[in-house]
Image: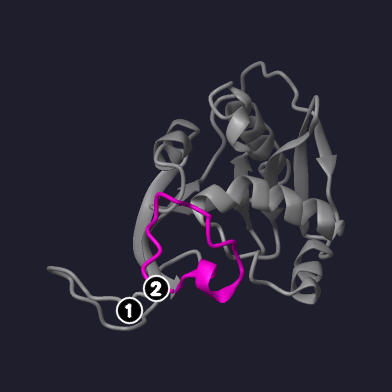
Amino acid sequence: MSDHPTDGPRLSLDGTTALPPTHVAAVVTYLEMREPPPPRERVPARLAAIGADLPRYRALYAAIGTPWLWFGRARMSDEALLTILGDPNVEALALVGEDGDIGLMELDRRRPGEVELAYFGLVPGSVGRGLGRRLMEEAVARAFSRPIDRFWVHTCTLDHPGAVDFYRRSGFRPYARAIEVAPDPRLTGALPRIAAGQIPLLAE
């Protein structure tokens, strides 16, 4: 996804726009950080590089994202995903807990002067224990470990309802909004049909 809304199909800007039952829609919020927050003492997180280990990456991505209908990487071929994860300017890291991987941080430095927090999240059982804050502190430290103009991220209304507030408390500032429409990944086979039960499946 682009770092800024782009022109696309015309939608109603004052009212509702009907979608086919085969599609889902979300409001996307873009946020950025131009400089890191004041440094403070932090507890280092136990991180492990995922690199091009596709089974590990896909398993962690699914564990975190399936409840929220994450589909960007799920519908990507192995070849396309390897092209991203194998790029030296992309860093995918797992937060490791006592029983395995419990969090994901993916930093994308492919555009000069900036870093995108492409993916960030925790498995459901690890939310609410302060681990997200620790993982974010690591993300910010790594992003600003070299001179950059900005660190940015996007989230949407299909994600955890506290995501925007979490990013704002972490030091990000919202700067743009867009509407994303896509085929329902549960109908295309990218995700299981039982994924994200809070989002009704309208077509069979």
Picture residue at 53% right of the left edge, 48% below the top:
67
The correct choice, above or below, for 21 with respect to 30 in the image is below
Residue 93 sits in quarter: top right
**In 3D space, how far apart are the residues under numbered discs 2 and 1 (Cα atoms)?**
9 Å
Name the one closer to the observer, 189 or 143.
189
Q: Is residue 106 visible?
A: no
Q: Main secondary structure of the magenta part?
A: loop
Q: Residue lying at the far front in this picture: please name it.
A: 204
Provide residue 150's location: percent of width, then percent of height. 56, 51
Amino acid at the residue labelled 1: Pro
Q: Is residue 92 visible?
A: yes
Name the one closer to the observer, 111 or 116.
116
Q: Which residues are magenta?
A: 183-204
Q: Residue under circle 2?
A: 203
Amino acid at the residue labelled 2: Ala
Picture residue at 38% right of the left edge, 48% below the top:
174
Q: Residue under circle 1?
A: 20
Provide residue 33's location: percent of width, then percent of height. 50, 44
Q: Is residue 73 magenta?
A: no
What is the crowding at mark 1: few (fewer than 14 residues within 10 Å), some, or many (at least 20)? few
